[in-house]
Image (cartoon, rainbow, N blue to C red):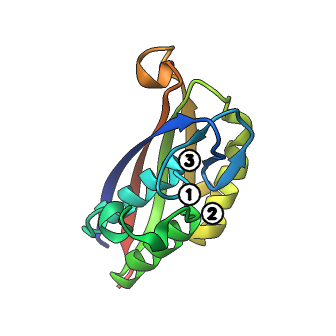
Amino acid sequence: MKIRTGFGFDVHKLVPGRELWLGGIRIDHTLGLLGHSDADVLIHALCDALLGAANLRDIGFHFPDTANEYKNIDSKILLRQTLALLRQKGYELGNADITVCAERPKLNPHIPAMQQCLAEVMQVDADDISIKATTTEKLGFTGREEGISAYAVVLITQTK
């Protein structure tokens, strides 16, 4: 059996007047993430990790921020399309390990809902998706609450 790993990273700026979407769920907060889509950094990092593992380039290649069809799009749609690309190439998710870096809001209470949401979108078991939240101890752009970043590592297996 052939297995591959992939790594993804994304960052978006926090701004007033936008909803905060992380891991496919809306989280109440005074700020939201700025982006062409809904700016869900967790899903974007996950998509990049999946695409990279299958040698399918990156999220910007498949879903460019210059294309109007992706303006304000729900990132769960991008994740679903990413999984379709992965499966067309003969791969399936083994597991994902994702870390979100944010000072606020506290994300730990939302992690089970994120895992369930992503599992449903990806048609996998929620146990195959690990999500962790951390801060940067008030250091850097994350510590100053200027943005949120996410890192994702995935394992994929060849199915055909």
Residue located beneath label 3 in the image: 130
Disc 2 element: helix
Give 136 or 87, whichever is nearer the viewer.
136
Between disc 2 and disc 3, whose residue precedes? 2
Between disc 2 and disc 1, whose residue precedes? 2
Q: Which residue is drawn at 33% across and 61% down?
A: 60
Q: Do the residues labelled 2 and 1 touch (CB within 8 Å)?
A: yes
Q: The C terminus lies in which quarter of the figure?
A: bottom left
Vertical order, 143 against 11 (above or below): above
Q: How far apart are marks 2 and 3 (CA)?
A: 11 Å
Give 96 or 135, whichever is nearer the viewer.
135
Q: What residue type is labelled 1?
A: Asp
Q: Which mark is residue 119?
A: 2
Disc 1 element: helix
Q: Is residue 5 left or right of residue 113?
A: left
Q: The N terminus lies in which quarter of the figure?
A: bottom left
Residue located beneath label 1 in the image: 128
Q: Which residue is drawn at 34% across and 65% down?
A: 51
Give 142 or 153, whichever is nearer the viewer.
142
Q: What residue type is labelled 2?
A: Ala
Question: x, y (%) of residue 124?
Answer: 59, 68
Binning the other alpha carbons within 10 Å of mark 1 as few (below 14), some (14 to 19) or many (20 upward) gives: some
Q: What residue type is labelled 3?
A: Ser
